[in-house]
Image (cartoon, rainbow, N blue to C red):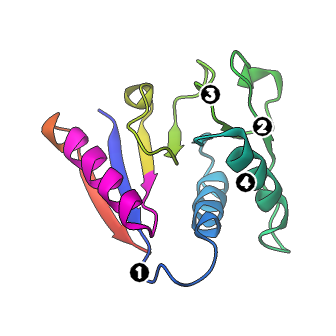
């Protein structure tokens, strides 16, 4: 069964929230996990693509933008993918969801990381997603970061 983790910023006024995503992805990469970052739009995908190259001077995370229908098996060294469309069918380890709604593909992943935004509307959307998962019996965990 898919395990769902919610990440809530301790101090939402500090820094770029996408940096939390980058740190999470870096840790997942170092632990050998394949990760798909699902964004709401192409602009956020592009921002995260750029940020993953630059957020830490000593970090290297091989990643690429994903397009619908991509096959992640064509590059065995890339384990981090970013996109705003349905993940490729070969992705099934970790889903980082940056969408306001529950992704339709979430249950095929072993783990889903939900990052809660600082704005009140984003918090409300996260509460709706939390209830959705909880009401269906998925194991949930909250993390203050």
Provide the secondary structure element on which disc 1 rests.
loop
Whole-percent x, y for residue 109 in the image: 45, 32
Where on the picture, by quarter, is residue 35? Answer: top right
Q: Quadrant of the N terminus?
A: top left
Report how far apart the C-alphas of labels 1 and 4 lie in the structure: 21 Å
- Closer to the chain start, of discs 2 and 1, is 1
- Closer to the chain start, of discs 3 and 4, is 4
- Closer to the chain start, of discs 3 and 2, is 2
Q: What residue span does the magenta drawing correspond to?
A: 114-133
Residue at which label 1 appears: 10
**Which residue is rendered at x = 59% and y = 60% of the image?**
21
Front-most of 14 and 88? Answer: 14
Residue at which label 3 appears: 85
Residue at which label 4 appears: 48
- Closer to the chain start, of discs 2 and 4, is 4
Q: Give yes or no for contact between labels 2 and 1 (Cβ–Cβ under 8 Å).
A: no
Work out which residue is located at the far front of the displayed protein and give it.
121
């Amino acid at each position: 069964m898919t395990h769902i983790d919610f990440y809530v910023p301790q101090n939402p006024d500090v820094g770029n929230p996408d940096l939390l995503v980058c740190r999470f992805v870096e840790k997942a990469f170092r632990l050998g996990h394949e990760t798909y970052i699902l964004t709401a739009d192409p602009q956020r995908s592009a921002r995260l693509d750029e940020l993953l190259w630059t957020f830490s001077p000593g970090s290297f995370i091989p990643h690429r933008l994903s397009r619908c229908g991509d096959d992640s098996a064509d590059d065995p060294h890339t384990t981090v993918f970013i996109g705003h469309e349905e993940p490729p069918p070969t992705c099934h380890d970790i889903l980082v969801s940056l969408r306001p709604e529950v992704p339709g593909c979430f249950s095929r992943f072993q783990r889903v990381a939900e990052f809660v935004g600082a704005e009140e509307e984003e918090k409300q959307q996260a509460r709706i997603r939390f209830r959705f998962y909880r009401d269906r019996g998925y194991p949930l965990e909250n993390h203050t970061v």
